[in-house]
Amino acid sequence: MTTIEEVVPVPSPRDGGTDGTPLLEVRDLHVEFHTREGVVKAVNGVNYSVNAGETLAVLGESGSGKSVTAQAIMGILDMPPAKIPQGEIRFRGQDMLTMSGEDRRKIRGQRIAMIFQDALSSLNPVLSVGYQLGEMFRVHQGLSKKEAKAKAIELMDRVKIPAAAARVNDYPHQFSGGMRQRIMIAMALALEPDLIIADEPTTALDVTVQAQVMDLLAELQREYNMGLILITHDLGVVADVADKIAVMYAGRIVERAPVHELYKRPAHPYTRGLLDSIPRLDQKGQELYAIKGLPPNLLRVPSGCAFNPRCPKAQDVCRTQVPDLLPVTEQDGTELVGRASACHFWKETIHG
Amino acid sequence: MAELSKTDEPQDATPNVSEVDVVDARTEEEAVHAIEAPVERGEPILQVRNLKKHFPLTQGILFKRQIGAVKAVDGVSFDLHQGETLGIVGESGCGKSTVAKLLMNLERATAGEIFYKGQDITKLSGRALKAVRRNIQMVFQDPYTSLNPRMTVGDIIGEPFDIHPEVAPKGDRRRKVQELLDVVGLNPEYINRYPHQFSGGQRQRIGIARGLALNPEIIICDEPVSALDVSVQAQVINLMERLQDEFNLSYIFIAHDLSIVRHISDRVGVMYLGKIAEIGSDEQIYDHPTHPYTQALLSAVPVPDPEAREDRERIILTGDVPSPANPPSGCSFRTRCWKAQERCASEAPLLAIPERFKGADSPAAHESACHFAEEKDVVHAA
């Protein structure tokens, strides 16, 4: 394993990021996979940005491209079969896609870290958790084994694992699901990154543990003023923690909005359908609204708007013309900050 | 294995559970007859009494000796009425799936009885057991692994008819399978396709069609929608509700998603470490919970409404569920409970209507296994 020098040319100081450039900006990103059956267009022109201290939730069903976008940002896509034909991923203004592999390695792990969904399969079962946590310090900062272990204990303390010093030599299977997810969070936090990407961090956990883990994540984010990209399909979790939301469908962002706005007045029929189809704890309704049909096969994305075969509002124009992600305004034309919708009929959807 | 006597421990005094009308069938003929008899809507069809399942923990290779037991299910009693849906919720490891297996007679109970129309199915065998099994069917969680990839949809749905040929005579089966596909909203022409040609939601429909094939009276659903996408979940839930009305089914609906359980259930039981902590109608449990565990569970559910999050009180439990091999003394929830006192460690609370609510005409008067049961609305914003 190589030791990477401590001197990193990329980052500007954490608190000095107020010059207008967002922490991370994804511009017109495309990702495709070349398979035997054809080209799978997993991501088709995604734009979003995150600032320090902000939480962006990327919401979508399986196959919507939300995880692939995250993997492209981290640079952990298998290429081939994956390919990024166009797009930019700018971290503090620098495009990571054109960077050399070495420069990129300095950002990955140190500046941008990732928390994966399934903690049991993301941790190595034959190495102790202390060793795996310490690896971050040994590889990136060149610390000795002993120093790394001391740092690992400190980290485990910070994510509130009881008796950290005693458990540092335990193996992943000796921890419960919630504790394992805490170790994943500790690993992501190790080098105090500017941005954390959390891919379904609580999907595999029980509700009571899920609440603990989300609370911890929010607390640490405040403490370090980190940016957070939260990838999830759970509208409830999003409502609890996010500042702004990007809803993805078939590799595109179909709606973007601040969290309160989105739940109050969705501007895309897909978002509306999702909100209507979840049963609520505090009300018992009659029949659930169900979005008809199935998510599209990415080998054969429908022409025009990808949602048109399932949409109750679909017209002829939806079958031929791909709607752009355009800003959403009030009825009198005043701009709604941070809102955009990719629907030909967004006006009808939001205003009536 | 040590024999568990039924009298050495105090049992739950559950007034909501009605008297079991045991049918004393001396011959197999009589037993089958009792099982085939119809049950009035609203009458108890399945009655579970003090059900236990302990898995032995052994040590040694040649000479195995038991060093303990995982008490997966430890004294559960409830009634299922004809035509209703009973929801069972709880965290992973609380024994809810083991209850399902016991009800299906896939596991042998360590102690306790399961009465189906007055017949204790844990003691049945032969033709009578076969008749019971026809009437209690199951829908599994994972539609990807519960369908044999080498069988066509027609073979999968038609397989129950091989075991129970009296339901559909040989020549009639194909038509019957196509009918079932139509009922669950799949194209009957898909009969010769294989499971991999379907999406998750469609596969779950195939699983439901298989469960319906023998015209059962009870369907046990073990997390039927948790593997599905949000937009598809609603379709499957709606389908299950429609089928319940159409075929007059009773459901036991096991899930960890409290919102879905509320939507579909008439009554809900909350399980913790192999015991029922609280049981009542959906309104009693969700709007008037009295057990601290139920309150914590409900308050932890993220509500898809950012307005509600600000003024909602959240109870965050510390720690994890204790191991069922070594449960805490007294009340099993006390290690995570903010109300726990000395009494909780020494005396296990029984599932009963709490003393203070007894006789009161309030929705809080339902069975709750807590010494300090107290009503607290955690779902609705203050």
Image: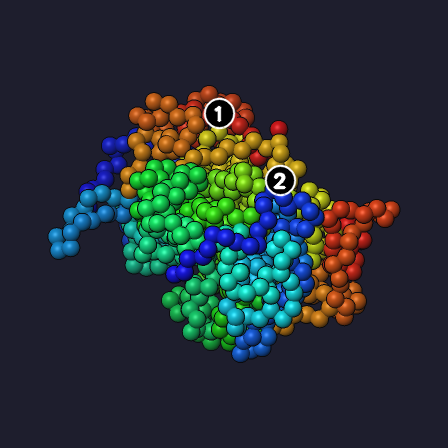
User: Circle 1 is placed at which residue position?
Assistant: B374
Of A147 and B250, the residue lying toward us = A147
Q: Secondary structure at mark 1?
A: loop
Of A162 and B284, the residue lying toward us = A162
Of A319 and B130, the residue lying toward us = A319
Residue located 43% across and 71% down the image: B149
For the question of whether residue B379 can be seen, the reply is: yes
Q: Residues within 10 Å of mark 1 (few under 14, many from 20)?
A: some
Question: In this image, A337 relative to A172: left or right?
Answer: right
Q: The disc labelled 1 sits on which kind of residue?
A: Glu
Question: In this image, A81 relative to A155: left or right?
Answer: right
Residue located 63% across and 44% down the image: A16
Placement of A70 over or under B292, stated as above or below: below
Q: Tell me the quadrant of the picture where the N terminus of chain A can be found.
A: bottom left
User: Circle 2 is placed at which residue position?
Assistant: A283
* Residue B137, x across and y down, in percent: 43, 57
**In which chain is the residue bearing label 2?**
A
